[in-house]
Amino acid sequence: MRRTIAASAQTGTDTDHGGAVDTLRTEFPFELPRGYVDDSGTVHRSGVMRLATARDELVPLRDDRVRENSAYLSVVLISRVIVRLGAIEDVHPGIVEDLFASDLAFLQDFYRRINAEGHTRAAVTCPSCQENFAVDLSGGGRLGES
């Protein structure tokens, strides 16, 4: 499901006075800290997560596994919004169950950032010079990498 939509397509006008068109970004790349290891031993680290829909958040509530154990909600929800994980395009709860705990925690935080806050940029302050700037957290890099 790709839904990158030009705002002008929705309104019929440019969204700023410079002629550039704003777009709604709905898919975000990520890189897992450890990676999913499939049955053949291949490690899948890079992936794409899309924004969640209301349906994505409601459907898991009807899942019997979630009814029996509310902690399973995040497994089902995360599996619904991951578009791709490495070469795997059919990400299902079984794959998410087999992730390392640190990778699941990363994906839960990533989900929260792109859905609740609406963006993956964070305001930070340099500890040395005290200059303020923004960092894009969706790039898949690790802290300290440039």
Image (tube, rainbow, N blue to C red):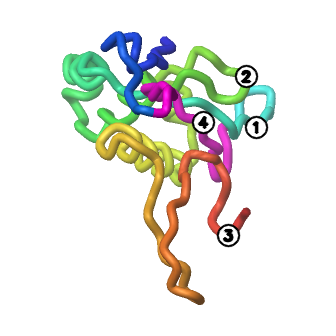
Q: Camera-side residue: 123 or 53?
A: 123
Residue 71 seen by the camera: yes
Look at the numbered discs 3 and 4 and tell me whether their residues touch, using CB distance below 8 Å. Answer: no
| Residue sticking out furthest to the bottom | 128
Q: Secondary structure at mark 1?
A: strand
- Find the distance from the CA under tag 3 to the CA under tag 1: 23 Å
Q: Which mark is residue 144?
A: 3
Residue placed under numbered mark 1 in the picture:
43
**Among all residues in the image, which is located at the extreme front?**
17
Q: Amino acid at mark 4?
A: Pro
Check if residue 34 falls in the magenta segment: yes
Which of label 2 and label 1 is nearer to you? 2
Residue kind at label 1, given as amino acid type: Val
> Mark 1 or mark 4, which is nearer the start of the sequence?
4
Q: CA distance from mark 3 to mark 2?
A: 27 Å
Q: Secondary structure at mark 2?
A: loop
Among numbered discs 2 and 1, the one appearing first in the sequence: 1
Q: Is residue 138 left or right of residue 108?
A: right
Question: Compared with residue 70, is residue 91 higher up or lower down, i.e. above or below?
Answer: above
Query: Whole-Å distance between the Cαs marked 4 and 2?
Result: 14 Å
Q: Nearer the viewer, residue 70 or 107?
A: 107
Residue that label 2 marks: 87
Q: In the image, what residue type sits under mark 3?
A: Gly
Whichever of callouts 3 and 4 sits on the residue coming sooner in the sequence is 4
| Callout 3–callout 2 Cβ contact below 8 Å | no
- Tell me whether circle 3 and circle 1 mark residues in contact (CB < 8 Å): no
Residue 47: x and y in percent read: 63, 32
Q: Identify the mark nearer the N-term, 3 or 1.
A: 1
Q: Give, as a single range, the part of the protein colored magenta.
A: 18-36
Residue occupied by mark 4: 29
Say which residue appears at 40% left-offset and 28% top-offset: 51
